[in-house]
């Protein structure tokens, strides 16, 4: 059973009633945002990048998240619900995807505008064949002040055990693994493809063995689904050198049937943790950091680095739009300015149309300079039908988290 595109009116039957029909009734069919895009216009007078690009709110461009595929081998119901992304779902054809050389060229131009961190994402990025070759190309780039870029990757961990060493050798600095629980039954139910949690844990261990530093684990918390896994996850990763981060269940895209009553506020989550595990709040490590940091304490009540820390990402209850410095590049070359965006800007046409580096860099600049995005700050005042002015938000599986 699926809700109609407007999210209202009578539902229509779509095959046999599933056992999990309560969730399926809330799923909204996919509206393909990959086709239309705004043109990236080259100004009449090109200006060389200065590395000091800011938007209308004074936010600099520092972080570029690059989706390398719209495919994923999981069907997590908060991201790619099986009821929508089924066996008949049409993925982008290979010739529509940016090549590694095209991605590297764009990354170099974004770095000229001030980007210092590049995160590879998806879909599931490790499904992109020979991804380590892209990492090696990106590792040759330099920031405007001559430094190596911070190269990181977000993965569901399913292929990490076999790829960790090659990624590290190619120049990857860090990895973040999505893991929504340690209980195998809970995890298999959430990934909805019966994938075992043990294989993800093996991937994390392989990342450590390969020498990848500052490994993080992201857990999306849904009240009533996996919130009982919060403490087991904290106990498991405490003192292991892996930082666990809890993410509030967000209304990304338009297909996951998001409801506010399934959000567990980070303040409540920290309260649950502190009832058993003493924590002290830590300072941010960098401007624009999404996670609020909490460190495990010793007997004297001071942060013990050996025990590590946890983080909470509170996009729903504590918006951090005011210092968001992230841009997102889709797998076929559209630039998005917010995780909750409804439209992107087409850079692929410039890439494949013979535009010079100077022209493409000049087209990127005004897009960021005119940026006004602050969806999370406005969420409570927007309609509850997953739209902004009648346009549906782009899916997270398409532009990455």
Image: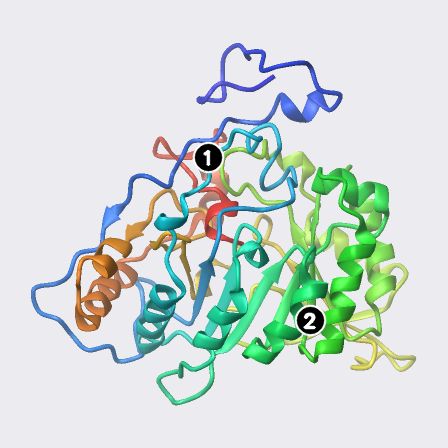
**If the image is split into quadrants, where does the N terminus sit?**
top right
Does dot 2 land on a helix, a strand or a loop? loop
Q: Secondary structure at mark 1?
A: loop
Q: Earlier in the sequence, mark 2 or mark 1?
A: 1
Q: Marks 2 and 1, how far apart in space? A: 33 Å
Q: Residue furthest bottom?
A: 146
Q: Residue furthest left?
A: 44
Q: Pick whichever, 275 or 385, lies toward us.
A: 385
- The residue under the point 55% across, 57% down is 125
Asked if residue 237 is positioned above or below residue 219 in the image, the reply reads below
Quadrant holding the C terminus: bottom right
Q: Quadrant of residue 21?
A: top right
Residue identified by numbered label 1: 90
Can the viewer see residue 392 in this picture? yes
- The residue located at (48%, 42%) in the rendering is 395
Please rate how many residues cluster around mark 2, counting C-alpha atoms within 10 Å: few if below 14, some from 14 to 19, many from 20: many
| Front: mark 2 or 1 | 1
Residue 278 in the image: state x and y as whole percent. Answer: 86, 68
The residue drawn where x is 70% and y is 55% is 158
Point out residue 212 in the picture as x, y percentages from the top left corner. Answer: 67, 77
Which labelled disc corresponds to residue 215? 2
Q: Could one spot residue 223 in this view of the protein?
A: no
Q: Nearer the viewer, residue 302 or 41?
A: 41
Model colouring: rainbow
Q: Is residue 145 above or below residue 287?
A: below
Q: Locate residue 206, reporting x and y percent.
A: 75, 70
Q: Is residue 123 left or right of residue 38?
A: right
Name which residue lies at 31% across and 69% down. 54
């Amino acid at each position: 059973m699926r809700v109609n595109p407007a999210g209202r009116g009578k539902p229509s039957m779509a095959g046999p009633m599933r056992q999990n029909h309560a969730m399926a009734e809330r799923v909204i069919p996919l509206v393909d945002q990959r086709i239309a895009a705004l043109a990236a216009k080259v100004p009449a007078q090109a200006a060389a990048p200065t590395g000091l690009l800011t938007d209308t709110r004074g936010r600099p461009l520092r972080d570029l998240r690059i989706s390398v595929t719209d495919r994923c081998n999981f069907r997590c119901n908060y991201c790619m619900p099986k009821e929508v992304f089924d066996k008949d779902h049409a993925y982008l054809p290979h010739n529509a995807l940016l090549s590694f050389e095209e991605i590297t060229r764009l990354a170099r131009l974004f770095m000229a505008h001030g980007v210092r961190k590049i995160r590879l994402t998806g879909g599931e990025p490790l499904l992109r064949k020979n991804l380590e070759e892209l990492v090696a190309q990106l590792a040759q780039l330099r920031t405007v002040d001559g430094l190596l870029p911070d190269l990181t990757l977000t993965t569901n961990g399913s292929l990490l055990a076999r790829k960790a060493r090659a990624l590290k050798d190619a120049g990857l600095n860090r990895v973040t693994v999505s893991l929504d629980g340690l209980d195998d039954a809970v995890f298999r139910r959430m990934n909805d493809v019966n994938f075992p949690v043990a294989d993800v844990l093996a991937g994390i261990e392989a990342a450590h063995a390969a020498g990848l530093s500052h490994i993080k684990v992201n857990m999306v918390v849904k009240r009533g689904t996996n919130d009982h896994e919060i403490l087991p996850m904290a106990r498991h990763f405490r003192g292991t050198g892996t930082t666990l981060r809890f993410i509030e269940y967000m209304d990304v895209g338009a297909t996951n049937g998001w409801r506010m009553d399934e959000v567990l506020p980070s303040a409540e989550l920290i309260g649950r943790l502190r009832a058993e595990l003493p924590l002290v709040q830590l300072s941010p490590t960098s401007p624009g950091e999404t996670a609020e940091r909490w460190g495990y304490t010793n007997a004297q009540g001071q942060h013990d680095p050996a025990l590590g820390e946890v983080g909470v990402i509170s996009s729903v209850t504590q918006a951090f739009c005011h210092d968001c410095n992230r841009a997102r590049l889709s797998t076929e070359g559209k630039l998005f300015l917010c995780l909750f965006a409804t439209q992107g800007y087409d850079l692929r046409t410039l890439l494949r149309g013979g535009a010079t580096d100077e022209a493409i860099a000049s087209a990127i600049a005004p897009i960021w300079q005119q940026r006004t995005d602050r969806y999370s700050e406005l969420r409570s005042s927007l309609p509850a039908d997953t739209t902004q002015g009648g346009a549906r938000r782009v899916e997270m599986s398409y532009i990455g988290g």
